[in-house]
Image (cartoon, rainbow, N blue to C red):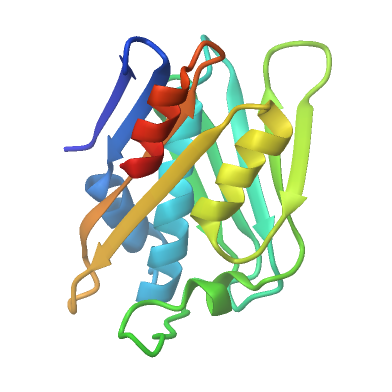
Amino acid sequence: MDYLIKALVLNNEARVYLLTNKDTVNTAIIKHDLWPGATSVLGKVLSLGELMGSMLKGDEALTIKINGGGALGNIIVDGNAKGEVRGYVDKPHVSIVNNKGGMNDYYAIGTSGMIDVIKDLKMKDLFTSSVENTGNIANDFTYYFFESEQTRSVVSLAMLIDIDNTCKLSGGMIIQLLPNASENTISTIEEV
C-alpha cells in the first residue's frame, strides 16, 4: 500500500513530504510494459507528481513534462490534490545500466531540453513554469522549487527494481524551509 505523510518539523520552521509508492510503480510497469530504465525514470516522476500534488488544494492539478532528448522521449505525469497520479513515457522499452550496476537515468532522460510544470489552480489561466533539464530529476526539481516557487527545498527520490522487473522500493521526500526558518534549522536540514 502506498503512503504519503505531510508534517511540520523543527519548531514549525520546515515542512516535510514523505512518500512510498511501490504499488503505483508496479501498476505502471504492468499497464505500460515498462522495462527497468523506463521504470526508474517514470517511477521517480510519478513520485514527484504525488508529492507535488499533495501541495495542492481541492480540484487543483498539475502536469510535469520532461523532454531531455533521451531514449525515453517525452515523460509526462499528471497529479492532483486527491493523491491521484498517472503518467507515461513515449518509449517504455528502455533499460541502460550505468557502470555501477544501476539504471542510467541520464541516458534515459537526456541532458538537454526543459522541464515544464503546468498547474491548474482553477483560475482563469494555467500557471506554467520551466527549468532546464540536466537529467538529474531530484536536483532539477530542487532548482525548480527555488527558481519557480521561491522555496528553498531538498528533493530526494529513490527507486529499487528487482531482477524480475518489479519495483521493490519507490518513494521520495521533499523538505521545504518556511519563511521563518532559523539558521539552526537550516544547518540541521543541511546536515541531514
Q: Is residue 166 left or right of residue 149?
A: left
Please tell me whether residue 31 is drawn above or below residue 175 in the rendered image.
below
Screen quadrant of the N terminus: top left
Residue at the limit of the structure toward the right, as seen here: 125
Q: Quadrant of residue 133?
A: bottom right
Image coordinates for residue 135, horizontal then vertical, percent: 59, 66
- How many numbered marks, from 0 up? 0
Q: Is residue 130 left or right of residue 179?
A: right
Residue, x 39% and y 77% (percent of image)? 103
Q: Quadrant of residue 188?
A: top left
Image coordinates for residue 81, horizontal then vertical, percent: 47, 20
Residue at the limit of the structure toward the front, as seen here: 183
Q: Looking at the image, which is closer to me, 95 or 156?
A: 156
- Can residue 91 be seen here? The reply is no
Residue, x 39% and y 24% (percent of image)? 185
Image coordinates for residue 41, horizontal then vertical, percent: 46, 63
Please tell me whether residue 133 is drawn above or below residue 9 in the rendered image.
below
Image coordinates for residue 28, horizontal then vertical, percent: 36, 55
Screen quadrant of the C terminus: top left
Residue, x 48% and y 17% (percent of image)? 181
Please tell me whether residue 169 is drawn above or below residue 149 in the rendered image.
below
- Can residue 15 be seen here? The reply is yes
Q: Looking at the image, which is closer to me, 152 or 19?
A: 152
Residue, x 65% and y 70% (percent of image)? 73
